[in-house]
Image (tube, rainbow, N blue to C red):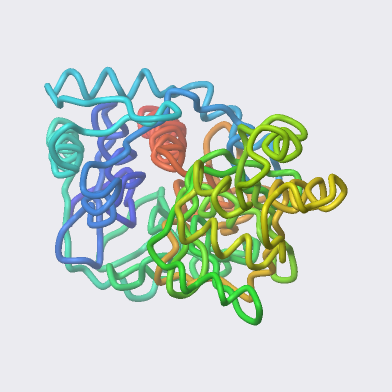
Amino acid sequence: MAEWDAIVLGAGAAGLFCAAQAGQRGARVLLLDHADAPGKKILISGGGRCNFTNVNTAPDRFLSANPHFAKSALSRYKPQDFLALVEIYGVAWHEKTLGQLFCDSSARQIVDLLLEECVKGGVELRCGVMTGEVEHRDGRFHVAGESAPRLVIATGGPSIPKLGATGFAYDLARQFGLKVVQPRPALVPLTLAGEDALFTELSGVSADVTAKCGKARFREAALFTHRGLSGPAILQVSSYWQRGDEVGIDFLPDQPADWLIEAKQQRPRSGLAKVLGETLSERLAQRLTERLGVTGELINQTDKALRAAQARLADWRFLPNGSEGFAKAEVTAGGISTADLSSQTMEARRVPGLYAIGEAVDVTGWLGGYNFQWAWASANAAALAIADGARAG
């Protein structure tokens, strides 16, 4: 039996990177995954092109019960650090909107990069391994017939179960006495019912909006679906949404104050649907006009009525009855409590040698590469600590 310094569970973004970084710093690392191949979530990310980081990464773009927890890891491994690695491997990339970096070609390039980094670190990767019970005795973690003084939980959350995602990380954390913040779907489409369900007839229609939930506000596209609301703006606010919350949408975020009064003065014979149709799709403009009950020409509307229409269009309230769940969620919010982990090393405070990184932890980024950056940063923090421990004997 080989003598390992660390066993990493989960060959996703965080697990692969942690194993590679620790291995390249001299630690002997075994990387295990129950799936038949590594990096499955990476391969489907970003429409198959992997939005591997975001240049605008900052701690305030992450949700956690402790909003300060992510600061240490994020400050020590930045988007530019991973980008430098991408460029070493000659992976062509481009920046889309809002600081999002994507591969020009394929997400497979990121998986190949990570696997090559593991090779450089002498990491042994075993896929298709059912870990079974994990035991801790004599100062070592025993799993799948192997043992090591350090164990890294990098098995993610239950989002996208068709790829084999489970809540295993939480079961393992609880086994060792770590608290778990209630996991919930995040970056997920929201569903509508009742009168709001009338908007599902607009399935496929999108608009550039500002969506908000509580204090969170996002200016991006919203998309109507046959079940409710989706698109980047909605996925963003979904991470903040709790059952019973309303979601507000400003359908015309670029319009100045009293724009409808001005339209009445300039085009008195136009109807509201026609005016809205100059900015929004014709179908959406018609549906909004119907719901507002503003019929006939603008000249026949009072300024009070038009201001009321303006106000509602700027903060149209939807009351989602749920989300599309973990099956459609890009990530999981909640997870292993940061109160039980060191923000410097990602090590469990009361269980020496046990680490948790990536999506398994209660740190959830915005849409647009932030969750990958958390994977790299948290993995790096744990890898440094593991390598230091291995060198110290």
Q: Nearer the viewer, residue 205 or 374?
A: 205
Residue 160 position in % (x across, y down): 36, 67
Residue 328 position in % (x across, y down): 41, 67
Q: Quadrant of residue 322?
A: bottom right
- Left or right, 64 with respect to 80, comes to right
Image position of 199 with respect to 68: above or below: below
Q: Nearer the viewer, residue 152 or 113?
A: 113
Q: Nearer the viewer, residue 180 or 160?
A: 160
Residue 50 position in % (x across, y down): 27, 42
Quadrant (top left/top right/bottom left/bottom right) for the C terminus = top left
Image position of 382 with respect to 294: above or below: above
Image position of 323 with respect to 114: above or below: below
Q: Name the residue located 38 percent from the left edge and 59 percent from the top edge.
A: 155
Residue 309 position in % (x across, y down): 75, 52
- Left or right, 59 with respect to 43, comes to right
Quadrant (top left/top right/bottom left/bottom right) for the N terminus = bottom left
Residue situated furthest bottom in the rendering: 194
Is residue 143 at least partly visible in the picture?
yes
Q: Name the residue located 73 percent from the left edge and 50 percent from the top edge.
A: 315
Q: Quadrant of residue 388?
A: top left
